Image (cartoon, helix red, strand yellow):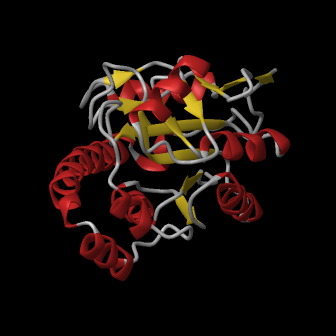
Amino acid sequence: MTPPGIVTGLRFEARIARGNAAGVRVACRGMGPERAREAAEELVGQGVSGLVSFGLAGGLAAEARPGMLVVPSRIVTESGGEIATNALWRERLCGALRRRMTIIDAPLAAVRRPLPLYLDKTTAWARTQGFAADMESAAIAAVARRNGLPFIAVRAVADPVDFSLPQAALAAMGKDGRLKPWRLALSLWRQPGQIRPLRELAGHGAAAKAALAAAAKAAGPGFAAHEAGEGRRSESRQTG
């Protein structure tokens, strides 16, 4: 069977996918919608059978806590549009995952920039009612739709809504999705008070990474993708 493709925005997310998901192809070009589109198109060029948006998400809802796994049936855009994920693929994946973990079925918000502050997150929640947010899923879904491929998203909450990301965390991550240690060191030298929130963020991140690894393993070969005979037709739709 032709394997599905997993798109990530960060290099460590790609390593988690490659190390735990069997029978898939993985591409990472970096953070944000444009780089996600490039990675998705790369996988389409390799002939994948579907696309997965895989990685971390920022919590928007008050109940979103680090390590919660969101497998949404729909993605809400900043303009108010909605993108449905592939129902058959998602149902199969959730069936495999629920044997190992709790799945959150709630809308995922698509945003175009990071949301580091409480005010950023609450504003995004008011606009979208999303449980969590990421920057790549909508772009990946658009590539899937254009190419008649199914699309799903699997995202683990990293930072809760009431946690503001320290500047060092934002500075340390390059647009290519790679950690830049010298930027982290420079930011800490300028503002040593960031050490405590960085440690807290590391704990949040560890819970999210563990959830992603567990999900990739539990999904089974081919990430629970299409069974023989289902074909390549996408059930995604977009409104608004």
Q: Residue at x 47, y 38 (%)?
A: 154
Q: Residue at x 53, y 25 (%)?
A: 123
Tell me if I can see residue 39 in this picture: yes
Seen from this angle, which residue lies furthest front? 190
Q: Say which quarter of the image contains residue 47.
A: bottom right
> Does residue 47 sit above or below 81 in this rendering?
below
Q: Say which quarter of the image contains residue 137.
A: top right
Q: Residue at x 59, y 50 (%)?
A: 4
Tell me if I can see residue 227 in this picture: no
Where does residue 169 sit, x and y in percent of width and height? Answer: 35, 60
Where does residue 111 sit, x and y in percent of width and height? Answer: 61, 39
Is 181 left, or right, of 135 in this rendering? left
Where does residue 122 sit, x and y in percent of width and height? Answer: 46, 25
Closer to the camera in the image, 74 or 168: 168
Is 9 left, or right, of 42 in this rendering? left
Q: Say which quarter of the image contains residue 170.
A: bottom left
Where does residue 97 sit, x and y in percent of width and height? Answer: 34, 31
